[in-house]
Every structure is written in structure tokens, then in C-alpha cells.
């Protein structure tokens, strides 16, 4: 199924049924009085997060969702049947906004989370409701109110613990393939990855984390170069970024340090929070250069960047160093979680 991460839909709740104007008419019953029943309530529309979904592609076809309308009341004080609510299933991690006002309505991240987005109309009152000691035969009743209608924008931000960054052909897809069961497309040309890919990395019997691979960035992405920065939103929910650097580029004129700075600059343009997120440097394709050349290139890269953070060397193609990287990432994620829990307790 095609990956789609943005869609707009219209939701319409059901209208309330009208109240009934009726009088009891039975043989041998004189002046039976009013017996008009109330109308049923209209159904509401709910958005429900479903972990089995991973794209908004279905909403490119089905764009309009309407709940059932309540039925009108009837004589003999019969209340009309209320309309059924409508559940619209969306992927976990979907942000919902009102198109017309830009209001944030909800952010559904957990399976089963349910949010009402359109309130059903209220049923009208039958003339029985208006009977009193003074008004013995009321001819008054009310109509049902219309259901709420809204124009919603859906934006999917995939749920992952770790995000991969890097230039096109840095080896992100190869790395996620080596560390998980994900099977993204891999080729020797730029922009092989056209949409985010997720993989579950298992580092122990009960230890695992989710890694996200997004299309490669290039300088000027924020101005529309390459695939732009529209996929960076999928990294906003991650807790750690792995910045891959090709240590053996085909073009020897490529400055590795400059490419790292360029991508960091694009992160800052997109989101300050994303730019300040913990980021590790992962030197990839170590199998393509001799050990002495690798050591010299690593020294120069770290010196040019004045890098003080964590650094790993891996070969995604052969799997060398990937196990150690996975173990270290797992420990870091557990530490981040412990710190976050401690903050909540205080």
C-alpha cells in the first residue's frame, strides 16, 4: 500500500430526530391528551487509533464520513431511535487539526485511543414534554438540532524510538535492514528511500526498540531541494538520532564534515527541538577503506566538527559493529526513559 502521511477529511455527525406532535386517540378514551414522543439523538463521529494501520492512503479515496441521523418521535410517547456513532480508524501517531481555524484537536498515539470530533445533534421534544396543569393540550414540539460538521486535517508522524539521518546513499536503508527485519528498497543511486520505513531492532529476549529510516536530506532541503523536509516530522517523536556518515564516498571531493553541518542546519530550520535532540555520529562503510585510512579520516572528521558526542563505526553491508550499536542505543533509551520518569515524579 502506498505510504501517505497527510490527508483532509470531512466529518458530519447525525442530525437529531424531530419531536412528534400527537394526541392520544383511542376508542372510549375521551380527551386522551398529548402523546408525542421525543426524537432520537444523532450519532457522533469518533477517531480511533489503530496500531494495524501505518498510512493514511485510504483517506485519499474516502474523504467524507457521516454518522447516522436520529429518527423522529412517534405517537404513544414513542421515542425515536438514536443514530449509531461512527468510528473512523486512523494510524497511531496521527495529529488531527481543524482546517479552518488551525486548532489542534487531538494527537492519538496509543492503540485504542478514541476522540470525539463531531457531536451528534440532540433529538427534539414531543408535545408531551410541554403538558402542564395550565396547558392540557399543547401543540408545541421542537425539531432536532443539526449534527456538528468539521473539516479536519490528518497528519501522520510515525512512532519510533530512534531516527536515522544522513545524505542520500549514506547507508541508512542498509543499516535498518542489517539491524531489523525491515526490507526497504536498496540501490546505488540517490533517493532510493521515498517514504519512511520502520524496523524493530531486538537486542535481547525482552529488549527492543523501533528505528525509523527517512529519505535522505541534502543542503537546501528546507527550500525544496531534493525531497524537501516534509519527512522530518517523522523524527519528532524519536528520542535519539543516529547521523550516518559515508566514510568512503564515491565522490572524493565530498567533505564529510561539511555534509554533517549542512544536515544539522536543515534540522534547525525545521525544528529547534529536533536540532537539540541527542544525536550520535555513526561512521558507515568502514569495510571499504583500509584501517589506517579509516583512522585518519575519522580523526579529521571529528576534528573538523569539534565533535564531543558519541561516535560509532559500523559496516551496514557486512553487519560489523551493528550489534554493539544496537546494545548501546538500547542502554541510552533506557537511561532517557529513567530520566523522564524521574522528572515526572518530581
Image (cartoon, grey):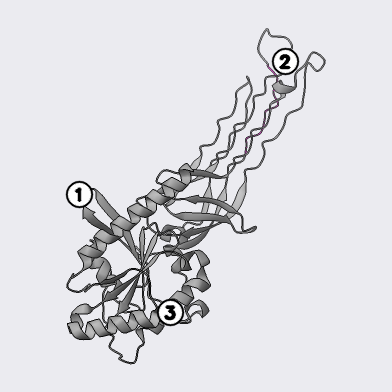
Residue where numbered disc 2 is placed: 33
Which badge, 3 or 1, comes first in the chain's sequence?
Answer: 1
Task: Please give the name of the residue rendered at 75% of the width and 18% of the height, measured from the top-left corner.
Answer: 131
**Residues in magenta, as a range:** 16-24
Q: Earlier in the sequence, mark 3 or mark 2?
A: 2
As measured in the structure, the alpha-carbon distance from the residue carrying label 3 to the one carrying label 1 is 38 Å
How many neighbours does mark 2 have within 10 angstroms: few (below 14), some (14-19), or many (20 or more)? some
Relative placement, left or right, of 53 versus 182 is right
Looking at the rendered structure, the secondary structure element under dot 3 is: helix
Q: Tell me the residue that label 1 is attached to.
A: 205
- 19 magenta-colored: yes
Classify mark 3: residues with Cα within 10 Å, few (<14), some (14-19) or many (20+): few
Q: Residue at x 70, y 21 (%)?
A: 128
Please tell me which residue is depicted at 50% across the width and 77% down the height of the picture.
222
Quarter of the rendering occupied by the N terminus: bottom left
Camera-side residue of 120 and 33: 120
Could you tell me residue 262's position as x and y percent? 44, 80
Is 118 on the left-hand or right-hand side of 114? Answer: right
Q: Which residue is mark 3?
A: 261
One can see residue 205 in this view: yes
Q: CA distance from mark 3 to mark 2?
A: 83 Å
Mark in the foreground, 3 or 2 = 3
Amino acid at each position: 500500500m502506498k505510504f501517505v502521511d497527510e490527508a483532509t477529511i470531512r466529518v458530519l455527525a447525525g442530525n437529531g430526530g424531530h419531536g412528534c406532535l400527537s394526541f392520544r386517540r383511542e376508542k372510549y378514551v375521551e380527551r386522551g391528551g398529548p402523546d408525542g414522543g421525543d426524537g432520537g439523538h444523532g450519532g457522533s463521529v469518533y477517531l480511533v487509533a489503530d496500531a494495524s494501520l501505518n498510512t493514511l492512503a485510504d483517506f485519499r479515496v474516502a474523504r467524507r464520513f457521516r454518522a447516522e441521523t436520529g429518527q423522529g418521535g412517534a405517537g404513544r410517547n414513542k421515542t425515536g431511535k438514536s443514530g449509531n456513532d461512527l468510528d473512523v480508524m486512523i494510524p497511531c501517531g496521527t495529529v488531527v487539526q481543524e482546517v479552518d481555524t488551525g486548532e489542534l484537536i487531538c494527537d492519538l498515539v496509543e492503540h485504542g485511543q478514541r476522540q470525539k470530533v463531531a457531536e451528534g445533534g440532540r433529538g427534539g421534544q414531543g408535545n408531551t414534554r410541554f403538558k402542564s396543569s395550565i396547558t392540557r393540550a399543547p401543540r408545541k414540539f421542537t425539531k432536532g438540532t443539526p449534527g456538528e460538521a468539521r473539516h479536519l486535517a490528518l497528519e501522520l508522524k510515525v512512532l519510533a524510538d530512534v531516527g536515522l539521518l544522513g545524505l542520500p546513499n549514506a547507508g541508512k536503508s542498509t543499516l535498518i535492514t542489517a539491524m531489523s527485519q525491515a526490507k526497504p528498497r536498496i540501490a546505488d543511486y540517490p533517493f532510493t528511500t521515498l517514504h519512511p520505513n520502520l524496523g524493530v531492532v531486538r537486542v535481547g529476549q525482552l529488549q527492543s526498540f523501533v528505528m525509523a529510516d527517512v529519505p535522505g536530506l541534502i543542503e537546501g532541503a528546507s527550500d525544496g531541494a531534493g525531497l524537501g523536509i516534509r519527512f522530518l516530522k517523522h523524527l519528532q517523536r524519536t528520542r535519539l538520532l543516529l547521523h550516518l556518515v559515508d566514510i568512503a564516498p564515491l565522490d572524493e571531493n565530498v567533505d564529510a564534515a561539511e555534509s554533517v553541518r549542512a544536515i544539522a542546519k536543515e534540522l534547525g530550520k525545521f525544528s529547534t527541538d529536533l536540532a537539540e535532540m541527542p544525536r550520535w555520529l555513526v561512521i558507515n562503510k568502514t569495510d571499504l577503506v583500509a584501517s589506517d585510512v579509516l583512522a585518519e579520516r575519522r580523526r579529521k572528521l571529528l576534528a573538523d566538527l569539534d565533535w564531543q558526542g558519541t561516535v560509532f563505526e559500523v559496516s551496514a553491508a557486512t553487519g560489523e559493529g551493528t550489534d554493539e550499536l544496537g546494545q548501546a542505543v538500547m542502554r541510552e533509551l533506557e537511561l532517557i526513559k529513567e530520566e523522564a520518569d524521574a522528572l515526572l515524579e518530581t
